[in-house]
Image: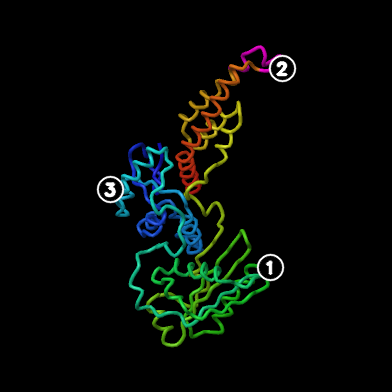
Amino acid sequence: MSVCDVCNSELSRPEGYLLTTKQVVSNPAYWEYAFSHAWSYVNGMSNAERIKGGLAEQQARQNSPWLLCRDCAERMDAATDQAFQYAQQWWSSGQTFSPPGCGAVPLSEVRLTRTSTASAIPRPTRILVYGRGFLPGSDDIMVAAQGLVLNKSQLTLQHFKDIPVECERRDTSERMEFFAVVDQVRNINPAAFILDSLCLDQKTGHDSAILAIWEGSDAAAARRALGESSGTVGKTSGVATAISPSQAIATKPPFLSAWTIWSFVPWLNWIAWIHAALRTGRGAYAFFALIYIVPLIVLLSQPQATGGKQPPDWIISIQSMFWIGGIVHTLIMRKGINKVIAARESQQRRNG
């Protein structure tokens, strides 16, 4: 049993279509569905563009394949015979098979909206990149440029190739003070058309800001093509390397989560399934807890349990089989259960 990675509907063998991360995040139909269903709450937020950028980056980092139901695959024009065959191999391999090309992709592969022809858009006159407490290097420039491409799907990385780039270090401890550089640049260049993107990196602290500047006749052409007011600071900000848990609802779950840890504890691995039943709201998982608690019940029923003596070897053997079997069982089931938990918590947040 598993669930669709897009709509969280339940799937059982041999259902589904298996896709790579690139096939999913580069398909605007996926984002249109996500931001009208699971992430619809984002649209009404003042910082919607920044949150969308963070969610897009997080989804683009997914290394594992995506299992889709028929409805979602057809919505994305991905219900191909090849994707169906890959899904069969995935089920047969115990959910370990990965199709060719599987893995994380750069932000440049993400397409949030259906694109229009980019040839009519002039290239920027110059690009400014600022680093908070560091001088941006080539990698920082690339990440920042990807942020602009992500939020303005009419742009491509080719628009930024061989454009003069000015990098500057700004030493400040406060983020808001650092991002004030956007206002400063706009005030200095009132006639220019400017797009900005703010990159917030919670892990390294390497926050950066990129401003693409169109001047002269190119400013008017870019304004017509991109349809964005150059006076709205932060409206095109798009890259958030680390976002809060509440913003990361319905993303693919990590390899191990809190409930799975219990399965590695001898004699107490049954607690994992009690936890799973409570988190998913599905009492059926409690049945597995009754199975895995058997060795503990047998142990406590023996005289040795109260006399402080070593349990008999046959009890240890039974416990070892139940323990190892429980770990394997958890690793097989954890993906589907984690997704159900994520979907349920997402619904609770939206209702609350």
Residue 43, image x and y in percent?
44, 60
With respect to residue 270, does 222 lie above or below?
below
- Give the residue drawn at x 58%, y 16%: 314
Q: Earlier in the sequence, mark 2 or mark 1?
A: 1
- Residue corresponding to mark 1: 173
**Is label 2 in contact with label 1 (beta carbons under 8 Å)?**
no
Q: Which residues are magenta?
A: 298-310
Mark 1, secondary structure of its residue:
loop
Residue 258 image point, x, y percent: 57, 40
* In magenta stretch: residue 128: no
Q: Specify which label sits upstream in the sequence, 3 or 2.
A: 3
Q: Residue at x 34, y 41 (%)?
A: 88
Give the quadrant of residue 157.
Answer: bottom left
Which of labels 3 and 1 is toward the front? 3
Find the distance from the CA under tag 2 to the CA under tag 1.
59 Å
Q: Going by the image, does 19 lie left or right of 273?
A: left
Label 1 environment density (alpha carbons within 10 Å; few <14, some 14–19, many ≥20): few
Q: Nearer the viewer, residue 210 or 182?
A: 210
Q: Residues within 10 Å of mark 3 (few under 14, many from 20)?
A: few
Amino acid residing under circle 1: Ser
How many numbered marks are there?
3
Residue 168, picture quadrant: bottom right
Q: Which residue is mark 2?
A: 308
**Residue identifier under label 3:** 81
Of label 3 and label 1, which has the lower sequence position?
Answer: 3
Please identify the dominant SS of the magenta region.
helix
Q: Point out which mark residue 15 bears.
A: none
